[in-house]
Image (tube, rainbow, N blue to C red):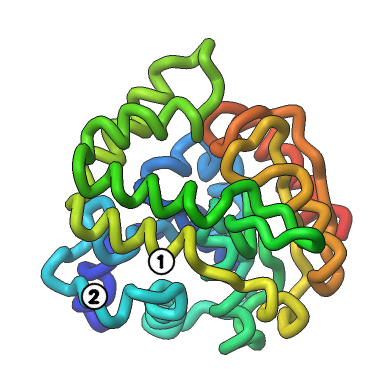
């Protein structure tokens, strides 16, 4: 086994099953964000957790501005992990921007994936009226990046409660804020720029793997319109509108997230 890749992405393998479930975290997060979800699947699946280069406990020395200036670089991380572990028949579970990273990986190597599960996905965060509502104007994104430059801690303090939403669970907001703050600001800004300026709408028709779209209520990052857009442009997709609010249901509403994933895998 090539320990370079395993160490680079801080790969961890859990579970007693044979079919792999690979969990990919979102922007500003790491694999620990899946801790409420994975125990429900450990008995039946082989769980693979990892951190993108630049996140969590990954090897920061492996970070490349050129490679990670587009989502294909992050998709490459996933495919290299899959090749290294010789994974087949993979159930891919991606949160937020990782949904589109999973889309790109599945287009490049469709034969290794069996299902794609997207939690709070968006193919494009910027509005393109009249045909597409992404939730942000281009100026909104530029202003956010400017704040990241001038006051990174202030940016994290502002964005975390907007993303998490669940005011009755302040510990989750604090955790997300801490996760943002633990990321190298230069890498975080580069990942934010790559994430929020990406437009993967044109990639959707190339997806050949069935998918589940988990769309949260009151999601400031991926509004409901985005969920419907994805459902109408993805091959054999299933859209589930969640009772969960905010952008991180795997943290705020883990049982609903587990139930929807389990039902999808059992009955489709």
Residue 31 in sight in this render:
no
SS category of the residue bearing label 1 = helix
Q: Earlier in the sequence, mark 2 or mark 1?
A: 2
Where residue 116 appears, as percent x and y from the top left, is: 67, 65
Nearer to the camera, 136 or 159: 136
Where residue 40 appears, as percent x and y from the top left, is: 59, 40
Badge 1 density bin: few <14, some 14–19, many ≥20, Cα 10 Å: some
Residue 199 in sight in this render:
yes
SS category of the residue bearing label 2 = loop
Q: Which residue is mark 2?
A: 65
Badge 2 density bin: few <14, some 14–19, many ≥20, Cα 10 Å: few
The answer to whether 268 appears left or right of 54 in the picture is right
Q: Quadrant of the C terminus?
A: bottom right
Q: Residue at x 51, y 61 (%)?
A: 98
Q: CA distance from mark 2 to mark 1?
A: 11 Å
Nearer to the camera, 79 or 240: 240
**Residue 2 in which image quadrant:** bottom left
Where residue 157 appears, as percent x and y from the top left, is: 32, 28
The answer to whether 242 appears left or right of 65 in the picture is right
Q: Quadrant of the N terminus?
A: bottom left
Q: Which residue is mark 1?
A: 194
Q: Residue at x 63, y 54 (%)?
A: 121
């Amino acid at each position: 086994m090539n320990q370079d890749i395993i160490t680079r992405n801080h790969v961890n393998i859990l579970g007693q099953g044979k079919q792999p479930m690979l969990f990919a975290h979102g922007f500003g997060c790491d694999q620990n964000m899946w801790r409420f979800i994975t125990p429900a699947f450990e008995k039946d699946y082989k769980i693979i957790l990892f951190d993108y280069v630049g996140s969590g406990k990954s090897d920061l020395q492996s970070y490349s501005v050129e490679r990670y200036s587009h989502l294909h670089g992050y998709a490459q991380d996933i495919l290299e992990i899959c090749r290294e572990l010789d994974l087949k028949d993979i159930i891919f579970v991606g949160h937020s921007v990782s949904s589109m990273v999973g889309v790109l990986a599945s287009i490049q190597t469709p034969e290794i994936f069996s299902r794609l599960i997207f939690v709070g996905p968006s193919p494009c965060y910027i509005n393109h009226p009249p045909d597409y509502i992404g939730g942000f104007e281009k100026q909104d994104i530029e202003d956010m990046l400017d704040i990241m430059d001038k006051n990174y801690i202030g940016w994290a303090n502002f964005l975390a409660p907007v993303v998490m939403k669940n005011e009755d669970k302040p510990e989750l907001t604090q955790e997300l804020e801490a996760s943002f703050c633990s990321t190298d600001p230069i890498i975080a800004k580069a990942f934010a720029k790559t994430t929020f300026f990406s437009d993967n709408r044109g990639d959707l028709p190339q997806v050949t793997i069935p998918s589940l779209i988990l769309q949260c209520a009151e999601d400031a990052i991926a509004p409901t319109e985005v969920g419907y857009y994805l459902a109408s442009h993805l091959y054999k997709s299933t859209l589930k509108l969640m009772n969960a609010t905010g952008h991180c249901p795997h943290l705020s509403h883990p049982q609903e997230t587990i139930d929807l994933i389990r039902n999808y895998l059992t009955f489709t």
